[in-house]
Image (cartoon, rainbow, N blue to C red):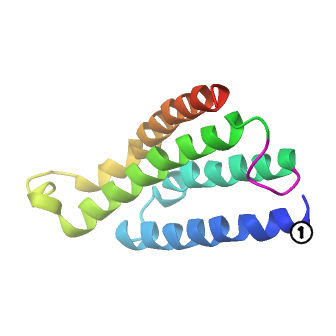
Amino acid sequence: MTRQGLVRLLPLVLGVIIIGAWFADVQRNGPYVVRNLLPPGFVLVLAAWVLIKTGGTWSIRDWRLPLATVGYAIPAIGLSTYLHYAYAVNLDGLFTDATRPGELFRFLPVYTSVAGLIGFAIGWIIGRNV
């Protein structure tokens, strides 16, 4: 990867580090912190792949891969972040009567990854038609 690509990837890396620290704080360093970092980590892998294939830029003639990456990132990171926020503030008493509210984080990466894959497919289709 070129230096330009590394510079463009740096904000994403810092964002994932910040999200990871916040996830660990919300989960009180529970057993599912690393598991919940897999979808944001996969966004980094996809973004690095885009930058390698495009020579360090986000735009190319074929927009399928960049738009698919954004399509994965929005639901995968957005949904995970929203549910961590809901847990942290007990949004509308969502976790008040739950017997084991922390179990939300056990399967959350699976749900967010599936949502991300659907977004990836939608971004790929839109990018094909651009």
Against 17, residue 103 (above or below) is above
The residue lying toward the viewer, choosing from 106 and 46, is 46
Q: Residue at x 62, y 41 (%)?
A: 67
Which residue does the numbered mark 1 point to in the structure image?
A: 3
Residue 19 percent location from the top left of the image: 50, 67
User: How dense is the environment of label 1, judged by Cα within 10 Å: few (below 14), some, or many (20 and up)?
Assistant: few
Secondary structure of the residue carrying numbered label 1: helix
**Which one is in front, 85 or 66?**
66
Residue name at image x 66 percent, y 67 percent: 13
* Image spot of residue 52 (x, y percent): 85, 50
Q: Which residues are magenta?
A: 55-60
Amino acid beneath label 1: Arg
- Numbered-mark total: 1
Residue 124: quarter of image: top right
- Residue lying at the far front in this picture: please name it: 130
Quadrant location, the C terminus: top right
Q: In the figure, 63 relative to 47: above or below?
A: above
Q: Is residue 57 left or right of residue 85?
A: right
Location of residue 125 (image quadrant):
top right
**Above or below, comparing residue 16 to residue 62 in the picture:** below
Which residue: 44% across, 45% down?
Answer: 75
Q: Is residue 105 rendered to the left or right of residue 14? A: left
Farthest right residue?
A: 2
Question: What main secondary structure does the magenta stretch of the protein show?
Answer: loop
Where residue 64 appears, x then y in whole percent?
68, 34
Magenta run includes residue 100: no
User: Which quadrant of the view contains residue 111?
Assistant: top left
- Where in the figure is residue 17, as x and y percent of width and height? 59, 71
Which residue is rendered at x = 44% and y = 42% of the image?
Answer: 112
Which part of the image, by quadrant, shows the N terminus? bottom right
